Amino acid sequence: MNPKSLAKIQAATPFLQWFRSCFPNAIQNRIRPYLDQPYQLALKLMDCCDGSEYRSLAEIAVAAGVSKNTACQVLGALRNGGLVSISSTSQGWQPLAVD
């Protein structure tokens, strides 16, 4: 993934969090196709690591239908923006609760 797209994702973290927390899934699914591709991908990866349990990078990549490298880059941009957390390489990724 190119650095410009990753920077867009990181800069959009407040919007991405707002979008996911304010709209029901049915509305999100209608709006998402109109968002820029980097935002669609970031939201998809965030969806894949939702839940109370940590998910591995490989699990998230498979669920999102992207390579592990792309998943790692996007999750890194989200982490830098404060939206996901990594506990350790053995536990994996999980979304953070952000106000």
Image (cartoon, rainbow, N blue to C red):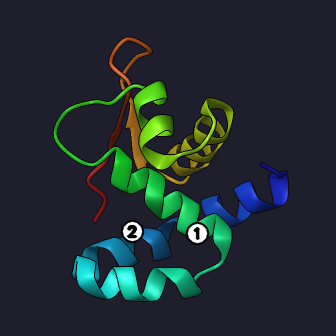
Q: Which residue is mark 1?
A: 39
Residue 92: percent from left, percent from top: 38, 24
Q: Residue at x 37, y 80 (%)?
A: 29
Vertical arrangement, residue 87 with respect to residue 70, above or below: above
- Marks 2 and 1 close (CB-CB < 8 Å): no
Q: Residue at x 39, y 88 (%)?
A: 30
Horizontal arrangement in the rendering, residue 21 relative to residue 84 (left or right): left
Vertical arrangement, residue 19 with respect to residue 99, above or below: below
Residue 33: percent from left, percent from top: 53, 82
Residue 79: percent from left, percent from top: 51, 44
Residue 65 visible to the viewer: yes
Q: Which residue is mark 2?
A: 17
Give the alpha-carbon distance from disc 2 to disc 1, as whole Å.
Answer: 11 Å
Q: Residues within 10 Å of mark 1 (few under 14, many from 20)?
A: many
Q: Residue at x 48, y 48 (%)?
A: 64
Task: Tell me the amino acid under the disc marked 1.
Answer: Tyr
